[in-house]
């Protein structure tokens, strides 16, 4: 992806929301290819902005499945910025997203396990169960908190 002037904020760096949207789209490809099923985003577990991305950079998104549950698929996205003039490359951001695979009736369905190959994949696979437990705890807390929210219109 190339960063154009309309892609940047007041600091002349790529809008974070733009990066997050692209990460979700790229991650969905990995989830769908892994499961060979329609997938929906269940959560954006984390997005860490590590280095600014400027209009002098091109951006490369790399994603792969790191862990699976019964129907859930965790995908890691590595975002690399490359200065197009100097060729310098840096990790600009990382993200973990979770998807759920759906059957023909739109219900969660089983997905295949992960067979990590590279050192990166192996490291992320080893720590996958820990992240899954944290996701479950976070989701439970979010549901409990949501019970306190209203759907009333603020002006009424």
Image: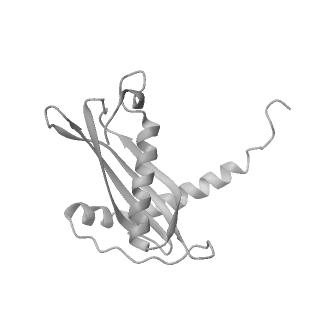
Q: Is residue 59 left or right of residue 98?
A: left
Colour treatment of the image: one colour
Q: How many marks?
A: 0
Residue 130 can be seen, yes or no: no
Residue ID at (25%, 66%):
122
Is residue 4 something that shows in the picture?
yes
Image quadrant containing the C terminus: top right
In x, y percent, where is residue 139?
Answer: 57, 57
Image coords of residue 119 (percent x, y): 20, 63
What's the residue at 49%, 62% (across, down)? 99
Location of residue 55 by image quarter: top left
Residue closer to the observer: 153 or 9: 9
Task: Say which residue appears at 38% left-offset and 67% top-offset.
Answer: 67
Q: Give the farthest residue toward the top.
A: 10
Which residue lies most toward the right here?
Answer: 156
The N terminus lies in quadrant: top left
Query: Between 41 and 132, which is closer to the camera in this rendering?
Result: 41
Please indicate whether residue 131 sits to the left or right of residue 151 in the image. left
Q: Against 89, is 144 above or below?
A: below
Location of residue 6 by image quarter: top left
Residue 92, horizontal then vertical, whole percent:
29, 40
């Amino acid at each position: 992806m190339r960063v154009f002037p309309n892609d940047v904020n007041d600091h002349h760096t790529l809008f974070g929301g733009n990066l997050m949207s692209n990460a979700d789209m790229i991650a969905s490809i990995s989830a769908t290819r892994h499961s060979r099923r329609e997938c929906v985003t269940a959560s954006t577990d984390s997005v860490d902005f590590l280095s600014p991305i400027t209009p002098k950079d091109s951006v490369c998104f790399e994603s792969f499945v790191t862990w699976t549950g019964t129907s859930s698929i965790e995908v890691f996205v590595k975002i690399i910025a490359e200065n197009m003039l100097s060729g310098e490359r840096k990790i600009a951001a990382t993200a973990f997203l979770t998807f759920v695979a759906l059957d023909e009736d739109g219900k969660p369905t089983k997905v295949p396990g992960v067979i990590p190959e590279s050192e990166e994949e192996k490291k992320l696979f080893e720590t996958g169960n820990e992240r899954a437990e944290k996701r479950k705890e976070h989701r439970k807390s979010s549901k409990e908190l949501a019970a306190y929210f209203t759907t009333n219109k603020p002006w009424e």
